[in-house]
Amino acid sequence: MKFDILLDMLFDLLNRRKTTAQYFAQKYSVSARTVYRYVDALSSCVPVEIRQGRGGGIYISDAYKLPVGILTREEYAAADEALEAMYSQLPEERFLAARKKLAAQNKEEKKQSFFPGDSNFVMIDSGSWGDSKPLSEKIRLFENAAKSLSVVEIDYFSREGERTARKIEPHILIYKQNVWYVYAFCRTKKAFRLFRIGRVYSAFLTGETFVRREVKREDIPLHYWNTPDSVEVKLEVREEAFADVQDWLGCESLRPLPSAEETAAQSAAVETDDSYARRFIAQVTLPFDDALVKKIVGLGAGVKVLAPEALKEKTAALAAAVAKVYEK
């Protein structure tokens, strides 16, 4: 029953973008405290947050959509059949709405769309494309905000992991060496800043607009560090490499190691007298080329390739070759 409610809440938020605890409490005949527990559970995998005070409520990021590949073709069919069966037993509009959204999502995933860009708002400084659906949606949101002169409120993680809320005026999107940035006027700092889109946890359109400011290319700080076939990459990330991988792949691509695997890893560390560091799993689609192998090796012992096997072998071979250079 809880799963049904969480799924229904997610579809409600995707449709409305903002609602209230009172709305959900009345809809499911539960207390507001129970609603907050549901929201807390939902927020573990979806960018949902609660805002207090005037204009507050339960929000979902404007950049969030159901991830591509969240269900296989067979799973989509099974979910559709389940919703149809539920509607036959309990003819409520919400089940029909859920079926429509699933159908639309399935249709959207079949499209081979690519971020088109606009020379007035996007600056590509070379590099290869590594992408996940949540990152694409954030890029598209900032591109549209730059075109429509819309103010965006973001939840932003610093390199040290500090989380802040800021209102920004997006002007230009920049892609440099596998990293996407948005160059925006920050209303908090009252100055232009370069924000790594991978560090943006959630983004909300405020409904405000801004007057475009003059931007010169030489003012943009770009001194930061032919798409081949892409593969689904799974990495184990140690705590010491977390910040670097977050910058590279985005915070939405990282999740804690499942508790059972975490316990096993701790036990293995004790048995080998090895120091234990907290670990995470990163899963994302990336271009399989030499640049990817070099990037992983450059992260050192803090990152281990779990899949695919071919990438694991190439990474191990390059790491061995580097080690050999330093043999006496």
Image (cartoon, grey):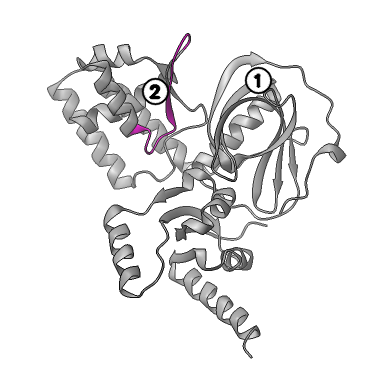
Quarter of the image for the N terminus: give it. Answer: top left
- Above or below residue 271? Residue 45 is above
Give the image location of residue 259, x and y in percent.
29, 53
Q: Is residue 316 magenta?
A: no
Q: Name the residue under label 1.
A: 150
Please rate how many residues cluster around mark 1, counting C-alpha atoms within 10 Å: few if below 14, some from 14 to 19, many from 20: many
Find residue 260 and report its image quarter.
bottom left
Please rate how many residues cluster around mark 2, counting C-alpha atoms within 10 Å: few if below 14, some from 14 to 19, many from 20: some
Q: Mark 2 points at which residue?
A: 13
| The magenta segment | 42-55
Q: Is label 1 in a helix, a strand or a loop?
A: strand
Q: Camera-side residue: 129 or 22? A: 22
- Above or below residue 59? Residue 273 is below
Q: Camera-side residue: 98 or 290? A: 290
Give the image location of residue 173, x and y in percent.
70, 37
Q: Is residue 117 something one can see in this rendering?
A: no
Judge left or right: residue 25 versus residue 189. left
For the residues labelled 2 and 1, the Cα–Cα distance comes to 21 Å
